Image (spheres, grey):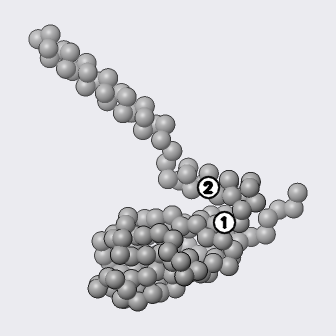
């Protein structure tokens, strides 16, 4: 009986520790907002987009290109992408056999225009997803 009580106590302490650690870890949204804010504070001109993959499984074979350079892999269903003013966002699906869809589901406040809802159908090629234009920084 004493052993069971010790085991249950250890499990309870472990679960409480996991709960505390999970509360300390920032969520993706908090990281997203923090990245945008730090870019504004440092006068770096970056916007953030969140893209969502559908129609195929996430894979490192699906590449997000920013101005023709590899910026990320769609190895998760949703991914955050950073881009500077005037950047062209493309999806390289040339290494994937089946067609798939990528949609912008979130954008930072410093991006002009409505990019949320923009999407690209990719079928074994490189498809343009968006042209990122940032708002002018506030004058101090």
Assign a secondary structure to mark 1.
strand
Q: How far apart are marks 2 and 1 (CA)?
A: 9 Å
Circles 2, 1 touching at the beta carbon (< 8 Å)? yes
Can residue 91 be seen? yes
Q: Where is residue 55 in the image (x, y as percent from the top left)?
A: 32, 77
Callout 1: few (<14), some (14-19), or many (20+) C-alpha neighbours within 10 Å?
many
In the displayed structure image, the side of residue 133 where residue 107 appears, left or right:
left
Q: Which residue lies furthest to the right in this view?
A: 140
Q: In which quarter of the image is residue 37?
A: bottom right
In the picture of the structure, the residue carrying the numbered disc 2 is: 35
Q: Quadrant of residue 49?
A: bottom right
In the picture of the structure, the residue carrying the numbered disc 1 is: 46
Between residue 139 and residue 118, name the one nearer to us: 139
Q: Considering only vertical position in the picture, is 55 above or below 37?
A: below
Question: In the rendered view of the protein, which quadrant contains the C terminus?
Answer: bottom right
Q: Which residue lies furthest to the top in this view?
A: 2
């Amino acid at each position: 009986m004493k052993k069971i009580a010790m085991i249950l106590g250890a499990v309870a302490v472990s679960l409480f520790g996991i709960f505390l650690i999970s509360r300390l870890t920032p969520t993706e949204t908090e990281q997203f907002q923090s990245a945008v804010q730090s870019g504004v504070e440092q006068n770096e001109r970056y916007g953030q987009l969140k893209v969502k993959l559908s129609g195929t499984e996430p894979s490192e074979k699906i590449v997000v290109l920013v101005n023709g350079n590899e910026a990320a892999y769609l190895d998760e269903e949703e991914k955050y992408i950073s881009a500077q003013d005037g950047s062209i966002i493309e999806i390289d699906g040339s290494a994937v056999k089946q067609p798939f869809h990528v949609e912008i589901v979130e954008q930072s406040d410093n991006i002009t225009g409505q990019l949320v809802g923009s999407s690209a159908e990719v079928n074994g090629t490189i498809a343009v997803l968006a042209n990122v234009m940032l708002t002018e920084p506030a004058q101090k």
